[in-house]
Amino acid sequence: MRFFRSARWILMTLLLCLVPASSYAGVFISVGFAPPVLPVYVQPVCPEPGLMWTPGYWGYGPDGYYWVPGAWVPAPYEGALWTPGYWGWSGGLYVFHGGYWGPHVGYYGGVNYGFGYMGVGFAGGVWRGGAFAYNSAVMHVGVGGAWGGNRVYVDRTIVERTTIVNDRHVAFSGGPGGIHHDPAPEERAAMNEHHLAPTSFQTQHMSAAMHDHNSYAKFNGGHPQNAAVSRPLAAESHAAPSFNNHGATPGNNHVGESQSFRPQATHGGSSPSYGSEGHQPTQQLRPAPQQRNESRPAAQSRPQHESKPKGK
């Protein structure tokens, strides 16, 4: 029985590798119980300009939930931004909606992963003239040398506007005790753009975690030793997808940069506010998130939006 379970997960990983990046449809996983809480960890310093942070998350494999470490990843094309995957509640099950690359950051359930992914959009940086500039209010980057010029800036206002508080570090959206944030118009538009699947190196990174005994919550108690890796993943270049734009230029990742936007969320706890300490859920593969949470617990309260990120 265990052999067949393992074979099923290996086959799923292989199928993912075969999905054309330009037509990301993906594979999805549904589970009958919620993922563990998001671990608190320190983001490794970005080793060089041009890398994008992809937060860690809980995946699901043969032995239950396992942790996929956060990692720095080269953007697959100029202007590309990463939308993290998230676990959502649907029909009595927890369903994973996989992450993807696109010209804008879409909906990821309101889950606050930290390091710019504060629950709504992305506050960690923006593409400027072919180069990515990092918001050091929430991103851990170097100083001097290659980090001069317009590579680094500080903008705490965007962080305040897009943070959904989650003090209990809940790792899922919707359902009993989950985060409740419906997609804003900007997030809905971004969800319907043409996306790229995770790169093959991201898929390998996920597979390595799935086959690591120590990454499973049943063995580490929900406290993975390697919550993030400092060495960046290898580069993989792709042509930029055709843009189904929604009134902004490719790579404008600031949901609140050109418009005043405040997230609306209710949650059976609150959502984590992480600045330089990120938390994040699992990522299994599914198409770009395109639905709102379908079930809500009774008597939910609306969380307070945090005024500034933690650790900064």
Image: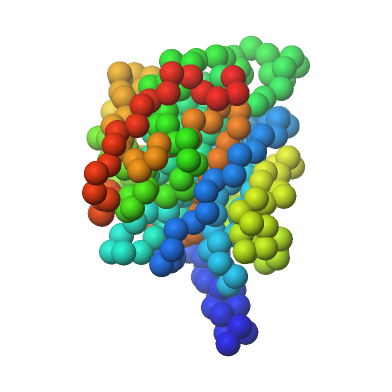
Report the residue that reaches farthest toward the front. 299
| Residue 124 x/y as whole percent | 52, 27
Work out which quarter of the rendered image holds the N terminus and state it: bottom right
| Residue 196 x/y as whole percent | 46, 50
As rendered, which of 298 and 115 lies closer to the eye?
298
> What residue is shown at x 47% (from left), y 48% (from top)?
171
Q: Is residue 35 left or right of residue 301?
A: right
> What residue is shown at x 42% (from left), y 23% (from top)?
306
> What residue is shown at x 58% (from left), y 72% (from top)?
62
Q: Is any part of residue 254 visible from this angle?
A: no
Q: In this view, does 221 lie to the left or right of 230?
A: left
**Count of numbered tags:** 0
Q: How is the image coloured?
A: rainbow
Dividing the picture into quarters, in which one does residue 2 lie? bottom right
Report the residue that reaches farthest toward the top. 149
Q: Is any part of residue 167 visible from this angle?
A: yes
| Residue 295 x/y as whole percent | 26, 54
| Residue 75 x/y as whole percent | 57, 39
Work out which quarter of the rendered image holds the C terminus and state it: top right
As rendered, which of 203 and 118 lies closer to the eye?
118
Is residue 252 depicted above or below 240 in this figure? Answer: above
Is residue 94 depicted above or below 162 in this figure? Answer: below
As rendered, which of 228 and 232 lies closer to the eye?
228
Q: Is residue 181 left or right of residue 94?
A: left
Is residue 144 depicted above or below 194 in this figure? Answer: above
Q: Is residue 136 left or right of residue 306?
A: right
